[in-house]
């Protein structure tokens, strides 16, 4: 793994994978009350589509929609504006510890 990820942004890519896991829509439905459509593109979710689940606020979006959203340097939920990263995780020291645990 490359250390440059850490320098690139405060929240590492690894962390993004853990707090915004990708899953299939039907898996998300099983884990709670999932909405029927994506608030970014307003299209209904289809069975088999890849979605990202925001563990912090429990909203789901198409994976491609959320990735595009993050490309604009957004770090909050498009729907409720909750930060992707829980407050305690924004602490830099905590991030580094997490990084160490992962490797
Ligand atoms: Zn979408
Ligand atoms: Zn949300």
Image (cartoon, helix red, strand yellow):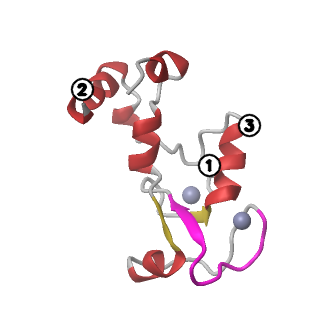
Report if the CB atoms under discs 1 and 2 are less than 8 Å apart.
no
Question: Residue tagged by mark 2?
Answer: 100
Q: Is residue 8 magenta?
A: no
Q: Is mark 1 within 8 Å of ligand 2?
A: yes
Report if the CB atoms under discs 3 and 1 are less than 8 Å apart.
no
Where is 79 relative to 38, above or below?
above
The answer to which quarter of the image holds residue 12 is top left
Q: Is residue 28 left or right of residue 48?
A: left
Q: Is residue 103 left or right of residue 32?
A: left
**Which residues make up the magenta segment?**
41-53
Give the alpha-carbon distance from disc 2 to disc 3, as whole Å.
Answer: 28 Å
Secondary structure that dominates the magenta span: loop
Q: Residues within 10 Å of mark 3 (few under 14, many from 20)?
A: few
In terms of image quarters, where does ligand 1 lie? Answer: bottom right
Question: Residue tagged by mark 3?
Answer: 72
Which of the two discs, 1 and 2, labels the residue nearer the N terminus?
1
**Residue 49 at x, y = what percent?**
60, 74
Residue 81 bears which disc, if any?
A: 1
């Amino acid at each position: 793994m490359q250390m440059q990820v850490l320098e690139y942004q405060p929240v590492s890519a690894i962390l993004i994978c853990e707090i915004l896991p990708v899953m299939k829509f039907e898996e998300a439905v099983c884990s709670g009350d999932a909405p029927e459509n994506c608030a970014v593109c307003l299209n209904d979710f289809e069975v088999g589509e890849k979605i990202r689940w925001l563990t912090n606020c429990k909203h789901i979006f198409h994976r491609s929609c959320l990735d595009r959203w993050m490309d604009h340097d957004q770090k909050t939920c498009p729907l409720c504006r909750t930060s992707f990263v829980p407050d305690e995780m924004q602490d830099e020291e905590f991030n580094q510890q997490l990084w160490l645990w992962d490797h």
